[in-house]
Amino acid sequence: MAQNSDLADRIDEFRADTRALNHIYIMKESEEYYERFNILYDNWHNRLEKMDFSTLNQQEKVDYILLKNSVTKADYFLDQEYKKYLEVAHVVDFTAPLLSFIQERRRGKRPDAKNLAKIMQDATKVLDNAMRPSNSKPFKDWQTADKASSVVISFQKGLKNAFDFYYSYDPDFTWWVDRPYNLLYDKLTVYAEFLKENYSKNSVKDDGSGIVGKPIGIDALQESLEMEFIPYTPEELIKVAQTQYEWCKQEMIKASRELGYGDDWKAALEHVKNTYVPEGEQPEAIMELYKESVDFIEERDLITLPELAKETWGMEMMSPERQKVSPFFLGGRDIIISYPTQEMDHDYKMMSMRGNNPNFSRAVVHHELLPGHNLQYFMTSRHKPYRNAFYTPFWTEGWALYWEIILWNKGFPQTPEQKMGMLFWRIHRCARIIFSLKFHMGEMTPQECIDMLVDEVGHEYANAEGEVRRSFTTSYPPLYQLAYMMGGLQFYALRNELLAEGWSEKEFHDRVMHEGRMPIEMLRSLLLDLPLNKNHKTSWKFSTAFN
């Protein structure tokens, strides 16, 4: 489907502007960086405000709202970080004489090497003084201390960049600056570590789990939800998740009874975990599950699966180190298989095998490959790729989770073991919503999140630990874990609306893959041709589809 939005170039331009500035302003924790990006976002707000929204077609109106939302979101989080920066900016007051050296390096101005060496030597002495106990007032909490440390590391990066540019090319610079620079660089490393640990003892950093995350708080959660076009409060979303959890639990009890375990669904789950395949046989088991799901979908003509898409996905094995934060499959261009390797100890091997048994994997393979993440990757590379700028986990993970719902409803799991396996992942998505939101609201600790996954979902402990570590210590945004189930419910609700309008399932599924990435409320506005205004606010109460 051809691009039919004249805003595509402007969207690409905004992304290019952002990349260009990030290329030049590498000290991301500096006054200069925050000021420059604030100007960028102000300029784009002004450009969008001057556009005549009423002259745009529906595709362009959607792109306008999405671009405006992207600028607003970036501006909001920049401001949040800038406020935190201002609290600790004094820790780099000593760097003022060195900033011109870093900035002028960008255009190759030759520095006064002798004077620069003196400035660096003086800065090293300032740091020695700053780290004396009598001069080092602790920060109020570990998060503030961490921010202060990151500000120093950011400056250190800029200083190294400038030094490396001149070093050995300019003999005068090299002769004067080599030793003072290296002494200062090493002292900055010590200073950053000192600041990171210099916080009030009333602030608890590690609850004993070894997992340290940064809760963003209720206000930032609510703002984030609105910018993802989710018209619910965190508390309301937790209630939706709890309702979904209870449904899953009742279905697990039904499957448990079929297996002869009565209402003890956890005992039935233990039985299913032990259906794992022997070492070395997991790739073949995955291939068999792939064939089953693709055949099931194509027999029912649910979506177009291009032959090239079926030909070009890859398969990789996950490293032991990566399995510590991703104990299950990952997917996209390839499916990345999590299964034990030789160097793991016995207990970890068994937890990995049990947690990746074929019945659990029944809900994972089509999620990661076709029609899930691999098909998303394939289609968004070919249809409206400019909308990759509007990436959201509610579209990405929601679509893959939606197919778990559809295949369940259409009878893909036949045996009680297969039902337990697919339900395990669905109940897991419910728990993700609850523990991730409560963590960011300050109501649960990482250890409590681990315990919840073990006690309420039935995870192996190591796998639960990996899931929580993945949620809070990696680059995943705060709403990511929420996005699986909520995005899936959005797609399901939209499907029902369009089927009521006379669409076929295949028409709906193919159209989604041709329109590209975006918040699902905006996809709904596009597919149903709903009225839009330039200041559109989220309002679609999608969860009623499952009430």
Image: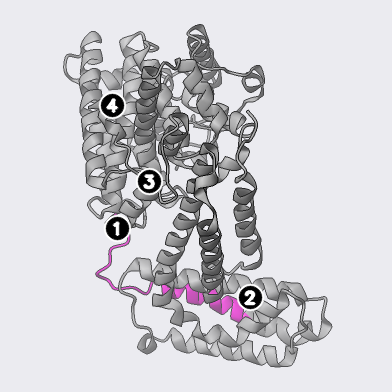
- The residue under label 2 is 159
Instruction: Check whether the beta carbons of the residues at disc 1 and disc 2 lie within 8 A of each other.
Output: no
* Residue found farthest to the left: 263
Label drawn at residue 545: 4
- The residue under label 1 is 219
Instruction: Check whether the beta carbons of the residues at disc 3 and disc 2 lie within 8 A of each other.
Output: no
- Element type where label 4 sits in the image: helix
How far apart are the alpha carbons under marks 3 and 1? Answer: 13 Å
Label 2 neighbour load within 10 Å: few <14, some 14-19, many 20+: many
Q: Nearer the viewer, mark 1 or mark 2?
A: 1
Label 1 neighbour load within 10 Å: few <14, some 14-19, many 20+: few
Q: Position of residue 328 (x, y in %)?
A: 45, 32
Left or right of residue 52, residue 170 in this image: right
Q: Along the line of sight, which residue is nearer the eye, 76 or 281? A: 76
Q: Position of residue 381 (x, y in %)?
A: 63, 34
Which residue type does callout 4 highlight?
Ala
Which residue type does callout 2 highlight?
Leu
Sooner in the amino-acid sequence: mark 4 or mark 1: 1
Label drawn at residue 405: none
- The residue under label 3 is 479
Residue at (38, 36) in percent of width and height: 463
Q: Is residue 200 magenta?
A: yes
Q: Is residue 73 magenta?
A: no
Which residues are drawn in magenta? 183-208
Q: Nearer the viewer, mark 4 or mark 1?
A: 4
Sooner in the amino-acid sequence: mark 3 or mark 1: 1
- Element type where label 2 sits in the image: helix
How far apart are the alpha carbons under marks 4 and 1? Answer: 27 Å
Label 4 neighbour load within 10 Å: few <14, some 14-19, many 20+: few
